[in-house]
Structures are given as structure tokens and as C-alpha cells.
Amino acid sequence: METPASPPSPPHSHTEPNQQNEEARGPRLREIPLRLLVPNLITVLAICAGLTGIRLAFEGRYELAVAMVLLAAFLDGIDGRVARLLKATSKFGVQMDSLADIINFGVAPALVSYAFLLDQAHSMGWIAALLYAIAAGLRLARFNVMEDRNIKADWQSEFFVGVPAPMGAMLVLLPVYLGFLGLEATPIFVYASVAYTLLIGYLLVSRLPVWSGKSSRIRRDLMLPIMLAVVLYVALLMSYTWQVLSTTVVAYLLVLPFSARAWHRRYGTITIEDDSTHV
């Protein structure tokens, strides 16, 4: 008598138990070096400083508000350099930096200026603040598009297209510095400040060639004098903050025509008309 055949055994699974457990838990979180977080933390601190400056302005603590905006601009200016130094650049960091830029160089200085002075011009003051903030956003968008291009023009190592946004934030606060120095908020001063705010917004989005200094070289024998000059400038800035900031802004504005003249001598035009700027 034949023994009935036993049912066929199921095919052997090649998946190990440990592998099954890992699949059940889902994808593992990838660990990243701590150094990759440092630039993003600086960017977050910059955003916090800019937003705190806005709050302080609406609380009437204007000097602290300006100090926080300038601190935000400083932190926002070094985060990219720190990222490159630590080899910690990332697409996430680039997006965070763009967000911080529009807050710290556009929204914060516009609102601080409005709370301190421009609100006395009522709707005109608010329109000026809005247009400046929008101009800063457009300036940053144009800069990001130009930076993303694989082939860059030679002049991009020497000139900016329009006043850079960090400098724009410092420039637009000039009426506030003058107010701290005791200049009375007369109607003439208020409406002149409205016009000045619009002018700075225009300079941000203009195609005016602005010397960047990126490709400049310094002779060895000038290193020590320049270092001493920087130390002197910082010492004066700490002691006579609003006077030094006002002088710096005026000096920067006076240099702009010479920058355009240097461009004209080299390229024969008054503004930058390269195709890469039409964005």
C-alpha cells in the first residue's frame, strides 16, 4: 500500500528575520555630521534677530531694534562663509538663507523705518516701506537666478548688478540714524525720508554696476595699515555708532557714481545690460 504523497513545502524564503524587522520599521534616519548644522543654526539666529528687531521697533525701543537688524544682517552675511569653511553647504541651507535674506534685508529694515519715522507720512510712508521690501525680494531673486547659472560672465567677479541687499538694509536706515542723532522729525524730513526709501528700493533693482571688491588684491605692504584702519573703524563704530553709520552710508552713496564710471570706461555703457541680468 502506497503512502500518500505529502503536500509540497512552501518555497524557501531568502529574507532573513533581521531584514524583515528592518523593513517593518521603515527607512532608517540618516545620521549627519554636527558641522552641517552650524551654518543653519546661524541662519536661524539671524531670522530670530531680524524678527526681534521688528518687535522692538513696535515697542518703541528703536535703538535696540536697529541693533538687532544690523546683527541679523551680520549673521546672515557670515552663514554662507561658515558653510563653505566647514564644507557644509547644502540645498536646504541655500533655501534657508534665502528666507532669512528677505526677512533681514527687506521686511525688518522696512518695518523698523516705518515704525520710527515713515508712519508720520501715513499711507505714503507705508507705500514706501512696502516698495522697499518688495524691491529687496526682487533683488535677492535676481541674485539667486544669476548664481545658479553654470556659465557666469567675467564681470560678475568685480561688479554687482544694483546695490546688494545687505547694503540696502544698512542704507535705508539712514533716516533712523539721523533721528537718533537728534534730527527733528519735521514734515520736510519725513517726506524726504519717504523719497529716500523709494530711492534705495530703486537702487536695489536697478542695473547700476556696483563695485563688489571680490577680485581685489591687496599688496603685502598695505596689510598692516588696512588691519589698523579696520580696528580703528570698529572702535569708532562702538563709540560713535550712529555718527559712523551715517558717515558710512553717505560715503557709500558717493562712491556709486565712481563705480558706474569705472564700468563705463571698461565696457562703454552706463548700466549692466548683459543678458544674464534680464530676469
Image (cartoon, helix red, strand yellow):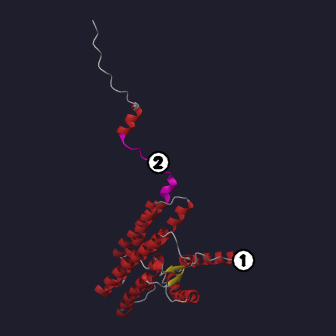
Magenta region, residue range:
25-38
Residue 122 visible somewhere in the drawing = no
Queried whether the magenta region covers residue 29, the answer comes back as yes
Q: CA distance from mark 2 to mark 1?
A: 47 Å
Q: Nearer the viewer, residue 11 or 55?
A: 11
Q: Nearer the viewer, residue 221 or 13?
A: 13
The numbered mark at residue 221 is 1
Q: Amino acid at mark 1?
A: Asp
Q: SS class of the residue under badge 2?
A: loop
Q: Nearer the viewer, residue 85 or 147?
A: 147
Upstream in sequence: badge 2 or badge 1: 2
Q: Please name the residue that numbered disc 2 is placed on.
A: 31
Tell me: 127 left or right of 211. Answer: left
x and y, in percent, of residue 241 in the image = 51, 79
x and y, in percent, of residue 249 in the image = 50, 84
> Which quarter of the rendered picture does the N terminus lie within?
top left
